[in-house]
Image (spheres, rainbow, N blue to C red):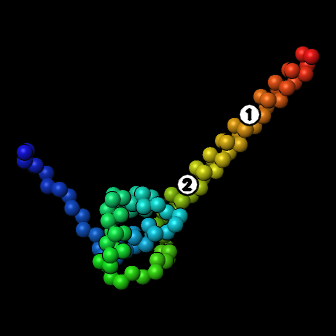
Amino acid sequence: MPAYTNAKRIFKYSDEFKMKAVQWSFDPQRSVKDVAAALDIHPFMLSRWRKEFREGKYGPMKPTTKPSKPNAQLKEQDELKKLRKRIAELEEENDILKKWQRFLAEERRKHSNS
């Protein structure tokens, strides 16, 4: 087995930071992956913190409430998600209109040839 020359980087996060991350991840509009990306942590770590929270490691379970001031990145991600959804809807509408236009053109050709 090779000897490692670089020591692993280990970050220690405060319990308060973990609690806020867990509370944000319980928000129905946010996924664990989005919250983890915004906080620059691995999604698996956040999932582990959620499990520890459910097991009561960070104190008694409190009802989850929305954070008073969400992170700016989380707001941007929510906005991006909404915009991407809207773009997909508009593209679908555009495709339907193109199909309708082709259909009308074919109908005109059929009626003009008869």
Which amino acid, mark 1?
Lys
Q: Position of residue 99 (x, y in %)?
A: 74, 33
User: Does residue 39 show up?
Assistant: yes
Viewer-nearest of labels 1 and 2? Answer: 1
User: Does residue 38 show up?
Assistant: no
Q: Is residue 22 left or right of residue 93?
A: left
Rendered image: mark on residue 81? 2
Q: Position of residue 14 (x, y in %)?
A: 29, 73
Which residue has dot 1 on it?
Answer: 98
Q: Position of residue 64 (x, y in %)?
A: 46, 77
Q: In this view, does 33 lie above or below 1?
A: below
Q: How crowded is mark 2: few (under 14 residues within 10 Å), some or many (20 or more)?
A: few
Q: Position of residue 94 (x, y in %)?
A: 71, 39
Q: Is residue 25 above or below residue 112?
A: below
Q: Could you tell me which quadrant the C terminus lies in?
A: top right
Q: Quarter of the image holding residue 55?
A: bottom left
Nearer-the-camera pick, 72 or 34: 34
Would you say the residues marked 1 and 2 are in contact, meaning their CB atoms lie under 8 Å apart? no
Rendered image: mark on residue 34? none
Q: Residue at (36%, 58%) from the top-left corner?
A: 43
Secondary structure beneath dot 2 equals helix
Extreme residue in the top direction? 113
Q: Quarter of the image holding residue 100?
A: top right
Q: How far apart are marks 1 and 2 (CA)?
A: 26 Å
Which amino acid, mark 2?
Lys
Nearer-the-camera pick, 37 or 62: 62
Q: How crowded is mark 1: few (under 14 residues within 10 Å), some or many (20 or more)?
A: few
